[in-house]
Image (tube, helix red, strand yellow):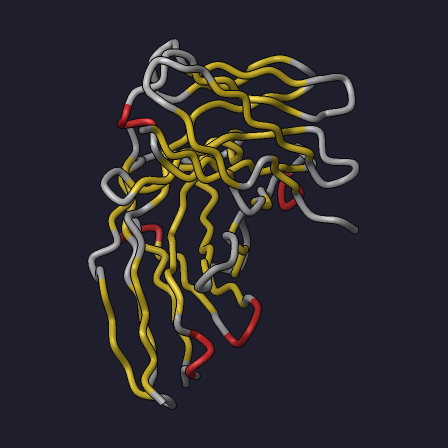
Amino acid sequence: AQSVSQHNHHVILSEAASLELGCNYSYGGTVNLFWYVQYPGQHLQLLLKYFSGDPLVKGIKGFEAEFIKSKFSFNLRKPSVQWSDTAEYFCAVGRSGSARQLTFGSGTQLTVLP
Amino acid sequence: KAGVTQTPRYLIKTRGQQVTLSCSPISGHRSVSWYQQTPGQGLQFLFEYFSETQRNKGNFPGRFSGRQFSNSRSEMNVSTLELGDSALYLCASSLAGQGLTDTQYFGPGTRLTVL
């Protein structure tokens, strides 16, 4: 069975700091990769996704992620965080052809201090 | 375009009862998946429905079941509720097409509390 690891459970940053959240998965086949965000009191929203092609994908609100196949990783980055980025971030993996059955990581709570 | 809607938003039940949760997908979306979110286990896949048929199932007991109607709306049912079933139940819909269209969009969830 596939699994997804998010190594950072809670990250605290000051505004304007750079962000990188790690995500590693264990599955040897072709995968579809996602980052979702859950803002306080809101539902899960899609930040960005990777299906194929350019391994560097850009999402909403200035976020980007890089798929490194050799490392089974899909790390999320943002050059300068804002207070409004405070939220919980989830990495999710779906097998190619079965992207509707996602395996989620445990989530990373990001707190941005003003 | 309206997002995924789930009803009810909050539900309180007692052990041994059964519960039915409802999900209306985004207009035009044909696939509905259900997930359970708890503090201890995180987000876990329950099952997925497409064209009124269950396509995939997660590792949950048979007390958890679901169905999909011809208009793509879906319901999930939990029978003989246990305390451990207290969770946020999320519904996600997808066009279920090829490639990038195979992306899930989530609803606000139904918060189930079992007493």
Among all residues in the image, which is located at the extreme top? B62
Quadrant in which the C terminus of chain A appears: bottom left
Viewer-nearest residue: A110 or A75: A110
Quadrant in which the N terminus of chain A appears: top left
* Residue at left offset 41%, top offset 42%: A93
**Residue B98 to residue A16: above or below:** above
* Residue at left offset 66%, top offset 36%: B98
Quarter where residue B8 is shown: top right
* Residue at left offset 48%, top offset 71%: A63
Would residue B48 be found to the left or right of residue B69 on screen? left
Q: Position of residue B62 (x, y in %)?
A: 38, 9
Quarter where residue A85 is shown: bottom left
| Number of numbered labels in the structure image | 0
* Residue at left offset 67%, top offset 15%: B52
Viewer-nearest residue: B56 or B15: B15
**Residue A85 to residue A72: above or below:** below
Q: Position of residue A103 (x, y in %)?
A: 37, 37
Q: Position of residue A2 (x, y in %)?
A: 30, 33
**Residue A99 to residue A33: above or below:** above
Would residue B90 be found to the left or right of residue B69 on screen? left
Q: Position of residue A14 (x, y in %)?
A: 30, 87
